[in-house]
Image (cartoon, grey):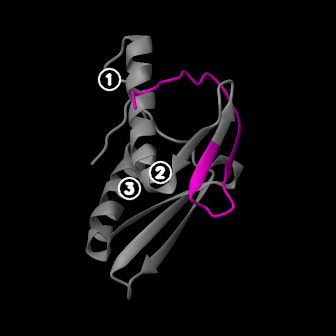
Amino acid sequence: MPDVSFMLNSITDMQLTADGQYLLIHGDQPTAALHRSVLNDLLVALPNAIEHADRVAHNNQEMGFALHCQGWEVGRLNGMELVVIRFRLSAHAGLSFSLPAEQIPYLLQALGGVVAASEPRAGDVTLQ
């Protein structure tokens, strides 16, 4: 079967199938059905694609991308060895990250460094 591509220029609705196996994306083209096994890969690919597309569109190779966050929560998993940080995004969506508990002091140190910066500089982002 030959590869078939289509251009999706708008999304009007998204929903999961009743069995949770597929994400259906409705838009200006025939409905796209994404199997749940590819959703994690898609989650990684989309921010990278957004950042790269913005860099090309604005001819700025330094441009970065960050999702807007409306709130956050912190918890523990797996007998307290993993710390989970969950960010609440728009439309009640959430995005969670887990990291080993021993990395928390370094995270606090990095956050403290950002907060302690005396003069915020527009457009500058430092990631560790």
**Mark 3 crowdedness (10 Å alpha carbons): few <14, some 14-19, many ≥20:** few
Choose between 39 and 18: the one closer to the eye. Answer: 18
User: Would residue 58 be counted in the magenta stretch?
Assistant: no
* Residue 85 screen position, x and y as percent: 46, 65
Residue depth check, mark 2 versus mark 3: number of the one nearer the observer: 2
Instruction: Say which element carries label 2.
Output: helix
Quadrant the N terminus occupies: top left
Find residue 94 and report its horizontal and vertical position in percent: 58, 57
x, y percent for residue 95: 52, 56
For the residue pair 77 and 26, the one nearer the viewer reads as 26
18 in magenta: yes
Gap in angstroms between the C-alphas marked 3 and 1: 22 Å
Q: What residue lies at 42% left-to-right and 21% top-to-bottom?
A: 53
Q: What stretch is highlighted in magenta?
A: 1-24
Is 96 placed left or right of 103 in the picture? right
Instruction: Give the alpha-carbon distance from disc 1 to disc 2, as whole Å.
Output: 28 Å
Q: Which residue is drawn at 35% across and 15% down?
A: 60
Q: Secondary structure beneath disc 3?
A: helix
Is 57 located above or below residue 28 in the figure?
Answer: above
Q: What residue type is labelled 1?
A: Glu
* Percent of width and height locating residue 91: 70, 49
Magenta segment, prevailing SS (helix, strand or loop): loop
Query: Mark 1 or mark 2, which has the lower sequence index?
Result: 2
Residue bearing mark 3: 111
**Residue 33 makes an appearance in the image:** yes
User: Marks 2 and 3, how far apart in space?
Assistant: 30 Å
Q: Name the residue under label 1.
A: 62
Q: Do the residues labelled 1 and 2 touch (CB within 8 Å)?
A: no
**Which of the numbered marks, if any, corresponds to residue 39?**
2
